[in-house]
């Protein structure tokens, strides 16, 4: 367990200033999260609604929970109000549902839109063209209780470093083209979440300002 604290402290030394560390605690028990908390970590990522809802009451309230998994529409209502950021909004339908439930609850939900660039199996997310269309068509203007803070993406799961770098470069360029388009009038669109245990250094070199690290901190997950 001491290893968790050490990993957190080591990562904090390695990560450049301005990059947020999300400690991905999915499949790890509350005790492991507490170890990281005691090392000063406050931001944690979970990928299943049920697991997150079970952990929240067992842990300190100043934890900022990020939801990073595929969110089923029937779970949206129970998640609203529990997160600092939902990083994995992967469709317009889901976004609009989050907005509707947030408005009903009288709160603003902060989200990232997940973009899919990795050339592999079934990864969730908007295609780059869908994402750009969503902004160009100005559909986001109808949102009343949702704040789109930026983009989240994953690189292809491969040892080919150039492929990984290329994926991150693509995610960053989609992000910056939206952020820098002044005609959109977006405010607070300032986060690009990319990079995991195996590829975060490349992600940071390619412009990431939020990294999501699980295995390196907590060890292998037992599914
Ligand atoms: C599980 C997960 C991570 C963490 O991956 P590690 O390789 O364990 O660091 C990061 N992002 C997302 C979206 C995840 O589902």
Image (cartoon, rainbow, N blue to C red):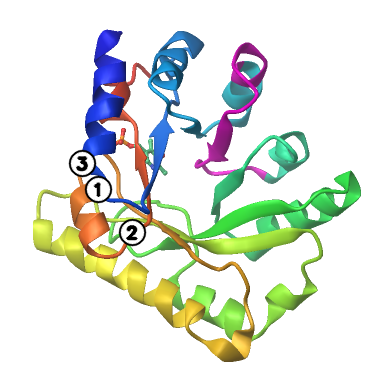
Query: Which image quadrant is residue 65 in?
Result: top right
Q: Quadrant of ligand 1?
A: top left
Q: Which residues are magenta?
A: 55-72
User: Which badge, 2 or 3, comes first in the chain's sequence?
Assistant: 3
**Gap between marks 2 and 1 measured at Cα:** 8 Å
Instruction: Pick out the residue farthest to the bottom.
Output: 183
Residue 146: x percent and y percent? 72, 59
Q: Quadrant of the N terminus?
A: top left
Which residue is under mark 3? 14
Which residue is under mark 1? 200
Q: Residues within 10 Å of mark 2 (few under 14, many from 20)?
A: many
Foreground mark, 1 or 3, reads 3
Say if the magenta span includes residue 57: yes
Label 3 secondary element: helix
Classify mark 1 as within 8 Å of ligand 1 or not, answering yes or no. yes
**Gap between marks 2 and 3 measured at Cα:** 14 Å
Q: Residues within 10 Å of mark 1 (few under 14, many from 20)?
A: some
Q: Quadrant of the C terminus?
A: top left
User: Which badge, 1 or 3, comes first in the chain's sequence?
Assistant: 3
Instruction: Decide if residue 169 is on the left or right side of residue 20.
Output: left
* Count of numbered labels shown in the rendering: 3
Which residue is under mark 2? 208
**Gap between marks 1 and 3 measured at Cα:** 11 Å
Residue 133: x percent and y percent? 56, 82
For the residues labelled 1 and 3, say whether their Cβ atoms are less than 8 Å apart.
no
Q: Residues within 10 Å of mark 3 (few under 14, many from 20)?
A: few
Residue 148: x percent and y percent? 62, 63
Label 1 secondary element: helix
Instruction: Decide if residue 121 is on the left or right side of residue 135.
Output: left
Residue 204: x percent and y percent? 26, 56
């Amino acid at each position: 367990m001491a290893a968790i604290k050490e990993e957190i402290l080591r990562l904090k030394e390695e990560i450049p200033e301005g990059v947020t560390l999300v400690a991905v605690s999915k499949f790890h028990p509350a005790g492991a999260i507490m170890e990281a908390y005691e090392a000063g970590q406050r931001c944690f990522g979970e990928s299943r609604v049920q697991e997150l809802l079970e952990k929240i009451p067992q842990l300190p309230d100043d934890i900022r929970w990020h939801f990073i998994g595929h969110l089923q529409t029937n779970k949206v209502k129970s998640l609203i109000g529990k997160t600092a950021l939902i990083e994995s909004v992967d469709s317009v339908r889901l976004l609009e549902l989050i907005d509707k439930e947030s408005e009903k609850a009288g709160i603003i939900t902060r989200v990232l839109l997940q973009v899919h660039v990795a050339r592999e199996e079934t990864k969730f997310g908007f295609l780059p063209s869908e994402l750009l269309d969503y902004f160009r068509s100005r559909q986001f203007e109808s949102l009343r209780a949702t704040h789109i803070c930026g983009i989240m993406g994953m690189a292809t799961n491969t040892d080919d470093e150039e492929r990984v770098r290329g994926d991150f470069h693509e995610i960053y360029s989609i992000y910056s083209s939206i952020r820098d388009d002044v005609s959109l009038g977006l405010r607070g669109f300032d986060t690009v979440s990319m990079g995991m245990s195996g590829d975060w250094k490349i992600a940071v070199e390619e412009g990431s300002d939020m990294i999501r690290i699980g295995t390196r901190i907590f060890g292998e997950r037992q599914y």
